[in-house]
Image: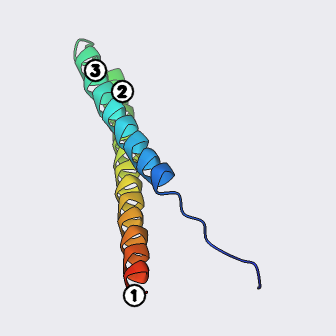
Amino acid sequence: MSGDRILVSYEAMQGAQAEMGKIAGQIQQEIEDLKGQLAKIEWEGQDANAYNEHQAAASQSVIDIKELLEQIAAAVGQAHDNYNETERSNAASW
C-alpha cells in the first residue's frame, strides 16, 4: 500500500495521557464522595440486601472503568516513549 504512513504527534499523545490521568483522578474523587454520601443512608430488611448488592456491582463497574482508563493512559505514555526513542535512534543512525 503505497502512501500509507503513521503520523505521530508527541504533544497529542502526552496531552491524551495527561487528560486520561486527570479524568481517572476525577472518577476516583467522585467514588470517594459518593461513598461518603451513601454511608449516611440506612436501609433495612430485603431492601438493604438488594441495595447493597446493586451498589457493590455499580461501584465495581466504575472502579473497573477507572482502572481501564489508567491502563490506557499508561499504554499511550509507553507508546509515546517508544516512538520517541525510535525516532532518536533512527536520527542517530544518520
Q: Name the residue under label 3.
A: 33
Q: Name the mark on residue 12.
A: none
Front residue of 69/53: it is 69
Q: Name the residue under label 2.
A: 51
Residue 49 point in image, percent of width and height: 31, 30
Tell me the amino acid under the disc marked 3.
Answer: Asp
Tell me the amino acid under the disc marked 2.
Answer: Tyr
**In terms of sequence position, does the residue under pointer 3 or pointer 1 come before the other?**
3
The CA span between labels 3 and 1 is: 53 Å
Q: Name the residue under label 1.
A: 93
Q: Identify the residue at image location x=29%, y=27%.
A: 29
12 vs 4: above or below: above
Left or right of residue 93: residue 48? left
Q: Dot 1, crowdedness within 10 Å: few (<14), some or many (≥20)? A: few
34 vs 72: above or below: above
Quadrant in the picture for the C terminus: bottom left
